[in-house]
Amino acid sequence: MARRNDHSREELTELTLSTVEKFLETRSFHDLSLRKIAGLIGYVPSTLINVFGNYNLLLLHVVARTVDKLASQARERLSTLSDPKEQLRELAYCYLDFAAKNPYRWQLVFEHNMKGERLPQWQSDRIDSMTGMLEGLLKVLSPNRSQQEVTEASRVLWAGVHGITLLSVDDKLFTDVPVNGKNLIDNLLNSYLPAWIQD
């Protein structure tokens, strides 16, 4: 068993989070526990409590790093395009692709629960940054819309893309023939955006 001074606090944080991320490459977070993570890195659970505060916050740090990775990939993909409609489509594709490639990390993002605790500001800021990316594109497409209208439209689109992603990744579309998630996203955007832009 590793001693408490084998790693600095920063090193132990990185070791813990990278170990959880490695675990999530092949298995669900439901198969994890504080004791299991501690065992994987050779520390006792109380050491992890001292570093992260509690198990729930430890998982939230993994969620934060996952959101950062998704945001980075989205910004990179959007940077190659100039048409806001195509950027919006690419943002949705990026969401679907990320979930398909990282199903267990993506699952953790949307199943993690604060269990009554307040969401830390550092995580709220990440969420605002991701939703802000979508809202910014909608504002360009329809600059006369109010912020409330933009926010509502962004949530309609996000809910639709999220639903398509969830059902695609879990293979729960229940069709006799294969259905491509990106085709469903195209259908959603092509149906929703023209009317919203013109209103």
Image (tube, rainbow, N blue to C red):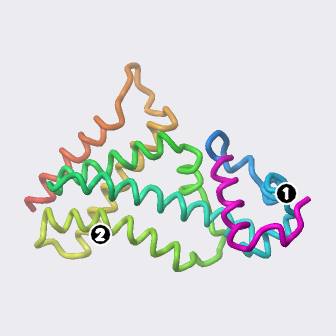
> To which residue does mark 2 refer?
151
Kindly give the residue lying farthest to the left in the view shown. Answer: 198
Please say if 197 is above or below 94.
below
The residue under the point 25% across, 57% down is: 79
Where does the image place residue 160, in percent across and percent down from the top left? 35, 50
- Between discs 1 and 2, the one toward the N terminus: 1
Is 90 displayed left or right of 159 in the figure? Answer: left
Give amino acid for label 1: Gly
CB under 8 Å between callouts 1 and 2?
Answer: no
Label 1: state its secondary structure: loop
> Which of the 4 image quadrants contains residue 156?
bottom left
SS of the residue at dot 2? helix
Locate residue 22 relative to residue 43 in the image: left or right: left
Residue in the picture at 41% in, 60% down: 71
x and y percent of residue 102 in the render?
Answer: 53, 44
Where is residue 180 drawn, in percent x and y?
Answer: 35, 31
User: The magenta stretch spans which residues?
Assistant: 1-23
Residue occupied by mark 1: 42
Q: Amino acid at mark 2?
A: Thr
Q: Is residue 160 above or below residue 151?
A: above
How many residues crowd around disc 1 within 10 Å: few (fewer than 14), some, or many (20 or more)?
few
How many numbered dots are placed on residues in this image? 2
